[in-house]
Amino acid sequence: MRLEVTERDRFLPEVTLGDVIRDIWQKIRRRWHLLAFAVCMTAIASIYYVATATPQYTANGSILIDPRYGQNPDQTSQLMPGLLMSDALTVDSELRVMASREMTKRVIQTLELSHAPAGDPSMVQRLKALLTGSSGDTQADGTVTTTSNLSASAAEARRTEVLRKQFVRGLKIRRSGESFVIDIAYTSPDIEFSAQAVNTIIEEYLSLSREEHVNKVERNRGWLSTRIGELRQEVRAGESAVANFRQTNNLLVPEGSPLPSEVAMTSAITQLVDLRSESLALDVHIQQLEEGVRSGNPDVVQVDPEDRTSTLDQLNASYDALQQQVLEALVNRSETSPIVQNLRNQMSQVQDLIIAEYGQILERLRSQSAALGRQVQATETLIAELEAELGVDAQKSVELRSLELEAAASRDQYEHLLAQYNSASQLVSFDATSARVIAWAVPPDTKSSPKSKQTVILAVFAGIVLAIALIVLLEALDDTFRLHSDISRDLGLSFLGISPVFGSDKKSRFRPSGWKPLSLRGGPWAKLGKSGQWLDFAASNPVSIFAETMRSIHVNMTMGRDQRGNDGRGYVVGITSSVKEEGKTSTSINFATFLASQGKKTVLVDLDIIARGTSRALKATLSTHNGLRTLLEDPAAVTPTLEPVSGTPNLTVVGNFEDLANVGPQHSYAIAHALLTLSQEFDYVVVDLPPVHGVAETQFLGKICDGLVYVIRWGHTRRPQVLSALKQLEGARGKFIGAIFSQVRVKSYENHNGHDTYTY
């Protein structure tokens, strides 16, 4: 299934991690010497640094800060969550105090006194040497060298500040995580001084904390003393005012007791309530008694025992006895019998007497009710009088209570501040501080820097990283041709092979049958010396990489010749490059000698009209008869008379012995006719063309050749140069046989192109 290509895929092509890693690895392999150099240099530098650097020793100490110090103990059970943040801020604040200017200044002064006896003029210099490991810039009298005249106090302050700044460089104070512990570390080249510096900081901080505590308590005591004196006067004045008010207004009762008018009022109200209750009960009893008397029936009349009389009791007893006799008589007699009638008459008389007695009791009760009414009225009058008196006393009581409250408030405040003053007086003699030492510093047993192993390892690692970064940068900035795939991908040409640096590619010493190196043929060739052995390197070393490249050119050229058709003439091949000194001349000579060694009748023509590289290289061996100008004047007559190379009838060289810089398009027909004439006489015509850049005639010279071979100096020629040159040869694009890399270092080439090498 084909997936749709998105815009992102067009601009961000797919990247395979394995390819990226392999590409980086190949780059490192290609420039391994740079990596090795960087690693060696960083290792040597780190070892030298470790060996020569002044050892530094770090001593450590710790103290615990109690952020709750100084808080009210009664508030600890009511701590709010926000207090945790304030605790952290307290610890951070103490940390800043320990690293402050005043704190470190005290430490410097303490260290200075502890290190030097009185009158020691070199103390500053020695202390500075302990701090920095150097001799410093102090004078013999112990003062710091200055550029301006300062007063004695200013010079001393400057000297102390200089030492303080130098001391702080080795000091490190930090909070241990989120805890309330502060870690103190000091680094110095002196192992004893580092521990002494940490301990001095701790001691000075504790001393400063104690001093601050004492100063705070003293300030608090002073304020409390003043305020207690003021409150003492206020308490005395308030209590005197209360006593005078009581005496003046006759309110001499215990504090909290009711006033006399208030007691009398309460008693009168209670009495009134009792009288009214008693009068109401008596009225109800009188009403009930009146109803019983009016009814005439003594049975329905109820009298309280305390109101009954003995006469009433006797009459009630007689009445009950008569009533019992009537009941007994009715058992044996009728209602109309005389005895019964007589008994009933007696009962009626006794009843009348009882009713009369009830009337007397009623009159007596009415008299009592009237007396109670008079008592109620008298009590109400008394209450009214007491209410007026109580109102006046109540107003006085309010004023008295206000005076008492003011006096009590002053007394409470006085007693509270007096307790605080006593507590503060005790704290003055108490050695209190918010810090507690967890660990004092001791001289370290090992140096803190430089760490030998870590330094060397880190240096080597840094060298590797920097080398890799430099390699990647150099590879990214390298716009020359190094991969054979670049030829087909960037230039669209066939890659024909490489031309190694001569001498680095001798695979075998055997020679092809009948071929003898030019440098060994004697005669004029002996004049070439050692340089002559490179002119036919491919022919003399047929199993070399260069020979394989020549065969590749020959094969591709033969295929092009076959496609052109056999018209009875030889093949004209031009060899050119982008700029000079890319190896096209040596390639041309070697290709011509290679073809000659294969038994092909070959002519080499030097058309590089400015550099004339072929003519200069073979000048000692060329016949003056084989001149280019002579050939151009009459190709048909001169071609048969050209002299072959001495001892090599298959190889002929046409040299450019004169300055032909004025050759231009007007000579194109003459050159084309000359090459055509040569192709009719020779199997191959090898033309050493000028480079594309710098010679405008290369364009039409390339068009008159049957095929072109482009020489690119490996790792030297820049891509823009080649692309620009090929653009100029756009008209002869179809004649290109391919391109080769020249002056290649085989080992480096193998590193760039992996296993795609010519090892067969």
Image (cartoon, grey):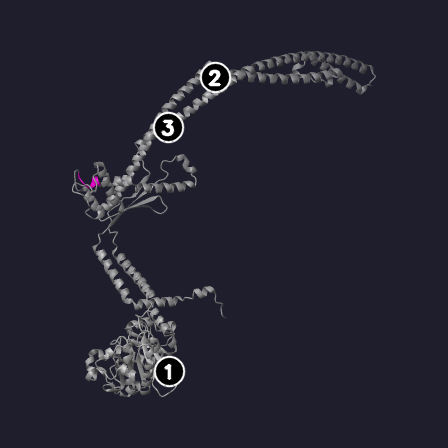
Q: Earlier in the sequence, mark 2 or mark 3?
A: 2
Q: CA distance from mark 1 to mark 2?
A: 144 Å
**Magenta span covers which residues?**
112-117
Q: Give the SS element for disc 3.
A: helix
198, 74: nearer the viewer: 198
Q: Earlier in the sequence, mark 1 or mark 3?
A: 3
Q: Is residue 120 left or right of residue 13?
A: left
Q: Is residue 688 left or right of residue 321?
A: left
435, 89: nearer the viewer: 89
184, 534: nearer the viewer: 534
Q: Is residue 115 magenta?
A: yes
Q: Mark 1 — residue?
A: 560
* Count of numbered circles in the view: 3
Please identify the quarter of the rendering in which residue 40 is found: bottom left
The residue under label 1 is which amino acid type?
Answer: Gly
Q: Mark 3 — residue?
A: 419
Q: Earlier in the sequence, mark 1 or mark 2?
A: 2
Q: Residue at x 38, y 68 (%)?
A: 19
Residue 310: image location, x then y, percent:
68, 12
Q: Mark 2 — residue?
A: 253
Residue 610: image location, x then y, percent:
27, 75
Q: CA distance from mark 2 to mark 3?
A: 31 Å
Residue 693: image location, x then y, percent:
32, 72
In the picture shown, does residue 513 fall above or below 8?
below
Tell me, yes or no, whether the two marked residues, 1 and 3, touch with CB atoms within 8 Å. no
160, 701: nearer the viewer: 701
In the picture shown, does residue 482 fall above or below 56?
below
Q: CA distance from mark 1 to mark 3?
A: 120 Å
> Few, some or many C-alpha atoms within 10 Å of disc 1 (few <14, some 14-19, many ≥20)?
some
> Few, some or many C-alpha atoms within 10 Å of disc 3 (few <14, some 14-19, many ≥20)?
few
